[in-house]
Structures are given as C-alpha cells and as structure tokens.
C-alpha cells in the first residue's frame, strides 16, 4: 500500500531535488554539539502545545459567566480532558524552559555572529511572543489568581510615558479587567499570537537550514560532521521521546488543578505572585522604583536583541570575553531575582 502511494506520487511530482538536498545536510560534531538538540526540542514541545490547545478550544468558552465552568467541564466530564489540560499547562512551562536553554546556549556559542544576526533577532522576538502567549493564556480559567495577575499585567504599561494609558486600555479592553479583557486575551492567545510566532519560527528554522548550523569559535578545528538524515534526526527523536516521558511524569505527579471562579468585587488575595518565568520582573519592581525597574528591563531586552550588532569581535572571528561575561551577568541577575522572589513571598 505504502509503495503504491509512493509510486503514485513519484509519477506525478519530482521529489528528487528535495531528497538530494536533504541527503547533503550535515550537522557539525564537536564537544558542544549536544546543544543543537534544543531548537528541535522547542519545535516538538510547541507542536504538543498546538495540538492540546486546539483540543481545549473545542470546549472552552471565553465569557466571565462560562469560562471557569467550561474548564471544570473539561477537567471532570470530557474524556481525558484533565490530561490534555495538564499537558498544555506543563507544556507551556517546558517550552519556556527549553527556549531559554536554547537561547543561552546559542548565546554562549556566539551562534548569533555573522551571518546569523537575523536568526538571533527573530529568536528574541519569538521569546517575547511565547511569553505573551503564556500571559494571555493565564487569564482564561478566570480564577482569582488569573484575574489579579492580569490586572497587574495590564496596568504595567501605565508607567510608559505618553502612550501608557492607551496601551493599558487597549490590553484590557476598558478601564478594568472584565468580559472584554477575556475575549481579547482569548483571541490573542488562540489566533493572533500563534500566527505571529508560527511565521517568525518558520523563517527562523528556514534560515537555520539555509545557513546550516554554526560551529563555536573554540571548536573550529573540529572537522567532524554527521548527516541530518537519518543520524541526527534519529538522536533528535530519542531526545523527543525522553522529553515526552519527563513531561508526562510531571503531568501524572502534579496534575494541574482548578481554583474557583473569581469574584472581582473582593480584594486581591495577599502574597499573590506570578509564574516562575515572570518572577524576575516582579522582584525587580519590588527592589527598584517602578519606572526605573521597567525602564531597565526594557533597555536590557533591547540591548540583548542587538547583541549580534554590538559584538563586532565575534563577527570578525575573534574572542569576545566581554559579551561572555555580559551573558553570565544576565543569568546571575535573572536567577538572583527569581530566587529572592521565591524566598521573600509566601507560597500559595
Ligand atoms: C519556540 C522557539 C524556537 C524554536 C522552535 C527554535 C528553533 C530552532 C532550530 C530548529 C534551530 C536549528 C537547530 C539548533 O541550533 O538547535 C535553531 C537555531 C538557532 N536559534 Fe532558535 N528557536 C527558537 C527560539 C530561539 C531564541 C529565543 C533564540 C535567541 C534569542 C534563538 C536563536 C537561535 C540561533 C542563534 C540559532 C543558530 C544556531 C547555530 O547555528 O548554531 N532561537 N532554532
């Protein structure tokens, strides 16, 4: 049957140029090749997010009256609904963790250097879009925590001079978080953001194939290569299976629960804090005056995005110790702020 389908296609479409191109693809082999698996791993987790997200959207209802109830229905009535929801929840955490590892590993290997500057800039944009996806998805269960977290998030732009008020209103769909915010977040989460990150990722991955993978400067003497198909892809598949096993273990051991529907009239509960990936923002705002904190994070993100154009040494094939130290400083800052936020707030 398979060969009959193959013959049918072969008689009609000439795939030989694609096959020849794929056969020529090579992956550099050296001491740090392990990190090359993380881009593909991000693609894999993203695919899980798309599939489970579509399944959830079949039952979810984005109105203040029905949102929490529809999620409860998914958890209690829909066959394996609890499983799909927990995979989507843990998958989001995994995706952000994997993308962070991929970003910092490509950073320290200076893979952003010429000619891969566009890949890096796109990468930073993808990370911002993925984090925005996590933020917009957070409100959807319409619980006390999700409600107040969104209230804080949508009021943050108020610190931006001149346009802050407008941006805050645009995000919330009004003066306060309500029905309009929920439909806005739902549309952004399920339509607008996926279109944006899918487009950016398609260009990012296309460039990785056109340019090939970079070799770190310290490994330039290593001339070893392995074939993309089947060697690298077989190992990549093993990495995917391992990751799936870890993800399912998290889901089984810590299934995501569902808190009660929010009552917006009640005050925000004490000790409220965001998910781990936003804790550094939270702690920065507790440590520094708001305007300085937000301004600093924005400036830091812009500099981070422009690193390939600032690190001229790396692009000229020279060692750039300053930028290695800059990367270390960023990690130290993120980890310190995150740990401080954990130990100085009550766990809810
Ligand atoms: C969902 C998000 C992302 C996906 C699916 C993705 C996917 C990929 C894939 C498949 C590759 C080729 C294999 C590899 O090197 O691992 C790659 C390479 C690369 N990515 Fe990403 N990526 C993502 C996010 C990012 C981010 C956030 C950055 C940095 C800000 C980034 C920077 C790079 C760079 C510089 C390369 C070239 C690596 C080299 O040539 O050695 N990517 N990405």
Image (cartoon, grey):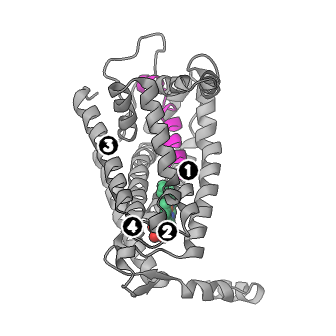
**Looking at the rendered structure, which numbered label has been put on residue 333?**
3
Q: Are marks 4 and 1 in contact (CB under 8 Å)?
A: no
**Label 4 or label 2, whichever comes before in sequence order:** 4
Verify whether residue 129 appears in magenta: yes
Residue, disc 1: 125
Magenta part, dominant SS: helix
Query: Marks 4 and 1, Cα distance to the nearest angstrom?
Result: 20 Å
Q: Please tell me how crowded label 4 is: few (under 14), some (14-19), or many (20+) other residues with Cα within 10 Å.
A: some
Query: Marks 2 and 1, Cα distance to the nearest angstrom?
Result: 21 Å
Identity of the residue furthest to the right in this view: 12
Q: Secondary structure at mark 4?
A: loop
- Measured as percent of width and height from the top left, residue 276 is found at 35, 39
Residue, disc 4: 109
Query: Marks 3 and 1, Cα distance to the nearest angstrom?
Result: 21 Å
Q: Please tell me how crowded label 3 is: few (under 14), some (14-19), or many (20+) other residues with Cα within 10 Å.
A: few
Q: Is mark 4 within 8 Å of ligand 1?
A: yes
**Label 3 or label 1, whichever comes before in sequence order:** 1
């Amino acid at each position: 049957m398979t060969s009959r389908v193959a013959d049918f296609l072969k008689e009609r479409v000439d795939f030989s140029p694609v096959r020849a191109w794929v056969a020529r693809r090579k992956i550099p082999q050296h001491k740090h090749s392990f990190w090359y698996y993380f881009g593909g791993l991000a693609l894999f987790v993203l695919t899980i997010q798309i599939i489970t997200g579509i399944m959830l959207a079949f039952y979810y209802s984005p109105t203040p009256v029905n949102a929490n109830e529809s999620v409860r229905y998914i958890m209690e009535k829909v066959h394996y609904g609890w499983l799909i929801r927990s995979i989507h929840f843990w998958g989001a955490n995994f995706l952000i963790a994997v993308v962070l590892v991929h970003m910092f590993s490509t950073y320290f290997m200076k893979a952003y250097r010429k000619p891969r500057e566009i890949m890096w800039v796109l990468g930073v944009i993808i990370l911002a879009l993925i984090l925005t996806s996590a933020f917009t998805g957070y409100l959807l269960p319409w619980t006390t925590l999700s409600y107040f977290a969104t209230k804080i998030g949508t009021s943050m732009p108020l610190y931006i001079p001149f346009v802050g008020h407008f941006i805050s209103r645009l995000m919330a769909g009004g003066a306060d978080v309500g029905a309009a915010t929920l439909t806005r977040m739902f549309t952004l989460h399920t339509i607008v953001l996926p279109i944006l990150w899918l487009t950016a990722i398609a260009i990012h991955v296309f460039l990785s194939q056109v340019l090939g993978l970079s070799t770190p400067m310290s490994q330039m003497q290593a001339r070893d290569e392995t074939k993309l198909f089947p060697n690298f892809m077989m190992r990549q598949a093993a990495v995917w299976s391992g990751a799936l096993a870890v993800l399912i273990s998290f889901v089984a051991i810590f299934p995501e629960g569902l808190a009660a529907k929010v009552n917006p009239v009640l005050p925000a509960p004490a000790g409220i804090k965001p998910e781990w990936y936003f804790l550094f923002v939270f702690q920065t705002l507790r440590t520094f005056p708001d305007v300085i904190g937000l301004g600093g994070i924005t400036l830091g993100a812009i500099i981070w995005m422009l690193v390939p154009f600032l690190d001229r040494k790396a692009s000229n094939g020279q060692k750039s110790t300053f930028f290695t130290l800059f990367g270390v400083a960023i990690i130290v800052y993120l980890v310190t702020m995150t740990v401080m936020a954990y130990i100085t707030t009550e766990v809810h």
